[in-house]
Every structure is written in C-alpha cells, then in structure tokens.
Image (cartoon, rainbow, N blue to C red):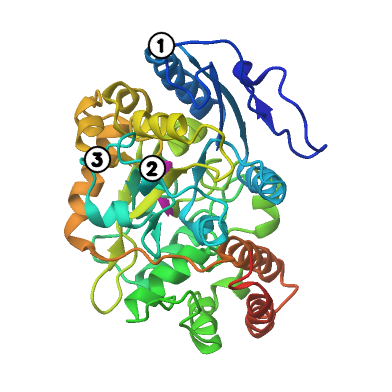
Amino acid sequence: MKITRKAAGAAAATAAVALVLTACSGGDDTGGDEGGDVTLTVAWWGNDDRAAKYEESIDLFEEANPGVTVQTQFQAWDDYWTARNTEAAGSALPDVFQMDLSYLRQYGGTGQLADLGEYTDQIDTSGFDEALLSSGTIDGAQYGVPTSQNTLAMFYNQDVLDKIGVEPLAEGYTWDDLNAFITEASEAGAGEDPAIYGMGDYTGTFWFFLQWLIQQGTDPFTEDGQLAFDEAQMAEFLNLPGSLRDSGALYPTERGVQLAPLSGFTSNEVGAEASWDNFLAGYVADSGTENIEMLPMPSGANGPQQFWKPSMLLSSGANSEHPEEAAELISFLVNDPEVGKIFGTSKGVPAVAAQRDAMEVEEGSVDATVVAYEEAVADQVTEAAPLPVEGFGSIEAEYKRLAEELGYGNITVDEFVEQWFMFAADNVGQS
C-alpha cells in the first residue's frame, strides 16, 4: 500500500492494510457534523500518475473548503480490495473510495455503503446520463456515483505489426477472424528475439466472457443476482481459440507472469490486446509508443453488442462520521471542470459534460483518441452493462486463477469449468 503525504501519521490497523482514521478538533465555518474541523479519508487503486491527479484535485477541494482536511492512500488492484475487505470487517471503510462495478453488490448489498441518494443537497447528479447513473444503484439505493465511462476495445500496436509485416484486424471482424490474425502474427513473429505473438489467451478475462454471452443473447445475471449461464456456455467460450492453445500460437502464460506488472503487449512482444478503452494512456506510457490504435470487440451474429460500463464509481462507507462532507467531496470530484481537466480520460471519459468539455484535448493526444473511439462505437454500444452478482470479485479472481492454470497446461477446459462452478456455488450471493 502507498500512503501519500496527506495520510502521514495515519494508524495501521493490520500489517496488510493501513486504516486512515478520522479525527475531529478545533472550529471553523464549514458546518461539520460537530461544528469543528473535519478530516476525510479517501482511497483508490492505481499507480503514481493517478495518485498525482487525485492529489491535485483534492488540493482544489481543500482550497474551496478550508475546514476540511483529506487524508489519502492508494494501492494496486489486488491489495486495494484486500484492504477494503479488512476495513469492512471492522466497519472502518474510508469516507470516500473508488468502487468498481464488480464489487458494488458485495459492499452495497450488505449495508457497508451509504445511500448517496439521500444527499441530494450535496451531490449534483443533473449532468449524468440516467442509464449510467443507475448503474450505481441496487434496489433503488445509490451506492456509487460513476466518475467516468468506458467500453471494451481491441488495441493493436502498429509498430509491432509493421515489424513483423502483418496487417491489423479490419472493422467488423469476428472471433474466427481474431484467431486467424493471432495465427498469422505469431507465425510471422516467431523468428524475432524475443518472439512476437499475435495475442495472449483472450478467454482468460471474465468480462470478455460476459461480452461474448451478451452476443449469444444471454444476460449473464438474473435480476435477483444469480448466474444466468451454464457450464456448456463457459466451455464453449474457453474453447474458442481452438487449436491455438495447444499449438503454442498464444502468448506464453509463463512469460506474461515474468513480465508482470507489465504485459506482453506493453513490452512490445504482442501485437494486440483487448481491454477497457481508458487503458490507452497506460499502454502508451508503458510501451513507449503512441502508435496504438483501437477497434471494437469481435462481432457476433448481431455485431459487437458492446455496453457502457462505469470505469469506476465513488462510494462512501456507511460508517462515515461526516457523510455530508463526504458527499460534497464526491460531487466535487465528479462534477468540477478543473478535475475533468486534471484527469482527462485516464479513468475513462468523464461521466458529465462539464468535465468532458473542460478537457484540454489536443488533436492526436491519448484523450482525443479515447473520445473519438467512444464516439465511433456509440452506435455499437447497444446493451446495458450487466450488474455483477454479489461475490463477483471472488468469482472473477477465481476465473483469472484458473485461466492461468489453463495457460500453464495444468488443467483442461472441462476441469476449469467444473472447478469454477463449484467455487461459484459457494460464493455467488456471499460477501
């Protein structure tokens, strides 16, 4: 875990996670719960670049609210949720923290989050698309406010493809076309040192499976938070690469583990990689090239059938001693134009027009590319984002673990499916 300068002196709750505690003292004119100075805690996942953007944004909030001090911390993704789980067990979640849609049911459905819909005087939601805002609700309670939106994209590195003499995928390509591209690129790059591959095993990401299910006409989850797909569907998706997994045409799992936290794509050893569109900034920074382009996901019978997903949301712990001030900070972070200018598209395209309009988007910049991509695929974003089941974070992590085992050749597709469904039976609907 990394704690920024604002969190210096915060108490550590366990060796694995530092819990930044609130403190109240003195007096001011901010109207805090007890008429005194207010200290808020804020947490997010991300890297140093995101931390710098949060710090700059929070500085602006503190300038506008001189009676409020904000203590901050951030961690990498996996450590972040370990920390939040520990805090939740002790009813000590941060006043404001980044929330992912994958975990919304786990925390919101178990009473861990404040219903932000009760703070209409503090949070301005007038600039939100109603469908996007509703993605943060469960049973009518607003447990998260989206900061931004994104959708899936197929990234390709034109420099890498030029090096091996392979053309990128064309608009309207299918899953079969993707397999053909991977085969061609991996064969063309076999003589490079290190070898260049077309792509890693795209079936190893749970969200891609959900995207594929939607293309098959299956809503992944029921309204009451249960799975709406079966073992045969998961096996069919995992078998999509066909012989590529056995022939060695997919980027080796062991090589990807060696390079972590980089990937084969950001190490310029892979020609293409699918992810959320706001990953472009990180891809450009880590790979050292701006020559990275985006396409929609592979098409099914009715096209890509993509969906907008809140790239992240902001939530507040139900345990907060300063819920109104926490709500005001959330409103500031999602609405203030200067904050939109600071973050750009690094968290996804801003959710409200005031922040989108404030972005200093230079032609050819990363921000311009992401905005242009979302405008280009808007007519292909035809589906609602699936609201993950309670326990989604656990079943997603188990899917990732099993995908790695599959990549190593330690398990078969059938064993993957059997083990995953056994795990899901014990974890879906469980916090």
Task: Give the residue type at disc 2.
Answer: Asn
Q: Earlier in the sequence, mark 3 or mark 2?
A: 2
Side of 269 where 123 appears, left or right: left
Label 3 secondary element:
helix
Q: Residue at point 35% right, 63% down?
A: 385
Label 1 secondary element:
helix
Label 2 secondary element:
helix
Check disc 2 and report the residue beneath it. 278
Side of 113 where 85 appears, left or right: right
Near mark 1 (Cα within 10 A), the count class, few <14, some 14-19 or many ≥20, is few
Tell me which segment is drawn in magenta.
275-279
Q: Is residue 157 visible?
A: no
Q: Earlier in the sequence, mark 1 or mark 2?
A: 1
Q: Residue at point 78% right, 40% down?
A: 16
Residue 184, horizontal then vertical, whole percent: 44, 63
The answer to whether 239 is drawn above or below residue 393 in the figure is below
Quote the CA–CA distance across marks 1 and 2: 29 Å
Check disc 3 and report the residue beneath it. 371
Check disc 1 and report the residue beneath it. 63
The answer to whether 367 is drawn above or below residue 293 in the figure is above
